[in-house]
Image (cartoon, rainbow, N blue to C red):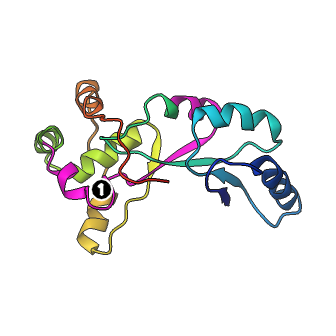
Amino acid sequence: MILLHHPGEGNVAACRALEKEVSAGRVRSLGLSNWYVKELKSFLPQVKIRPALVPKEIHPYYQENDEIPFIQQQGIIVQGWYPLGGRGYVHKLLADPVLTGIAGTHGVSAAQVVLRWNLQKGVIVIPGSNKPTEIRENLNLFGFSLSSEEMKRIRGLDRGGKHDWY
């Protein structure tokens, strides 16, 4: 997969060139990183191959609730980067009383709650860690599910503020 990393001038031409590479079998799929509905609405009608993936910053403090459904309705997978809050924010996010309360109810960690929340929204997440215990914990998301009330409580954490500029 090749991603066009940011919306900008020349992306239609770049995508058309990449479409030729897909047709030639040198590239399997295309994606658009950090794109928003506004850019997608004007871009998608101009290209032949539907992007397979749109990675975006998504975590409980920056949820993109208006963006995700539109992207998914286009048949595009949404991937959340910084699912646990990102550089300098992980500890604060994982100590949030809403998340720790929900975690306690299920006997899991706040990180597992956040990752499960993403999965239930249909957002793919790939959290980073180099600690084997955290990696195992991050994979153990299928023994519980969040109720609609818990999803609503997490939705209430949205601050609309990005943790990284891109």
Measured as percent of width and height from the top left, residue 128 is found at 37, 65
Count of all numbered marks drawn on residues in the image: 1
Measured as percent of width and height from the top left, residue 17 is found at 85, 57
Q: What residue is pinned by disc 1?
A: 140
Label 1 SS: loop
Pick whichever, 102 or 88, lies toward us: 88
In the rendered view, does 114 fall on the left or right side of 9? left
Pick whichever, 5 or 80, lies toward us: 5
Measured as percent of width and height from the top left, residue 4 is found at 67, 55
Q: Residue at x 61, y 48 (%)?
A: 53
Q: Residue at x 79, y 47 (%)?
A: 12
Q: Quadrant of residue 38?
A: top right
* Image quarter (top left, top right, bottom left or bottom right) of the N terminus: bottom right
In the rendered view, does 59 fall on the left or right side of 53? left
43 within the magenta span: no
Q: Give the residue at the far front of this rendering.
A: 9
* Three-letter code, disc 1: Asn
> Which residues are the magenta region?
69-96
88 within the magenta span: yes
Label 1: few (<14), some (14–19) or many (≥20) C-alpha neighbours in 10 Å = some
Q: Residue at x 74, y 36 (%)?
A: 44
The answer to whether residue 109 is visible is no
The answer to whether residue 68 is visible is yes
Q: Residue at x 47, y 48 (%)?
A: 124
Pick whichever, 88 or 137, lies toward us: 88
Q: Is residue 80 above or below residue 145?
A: below
Measured as percent of width and height from the top left, residue 127 is found at 37, 60
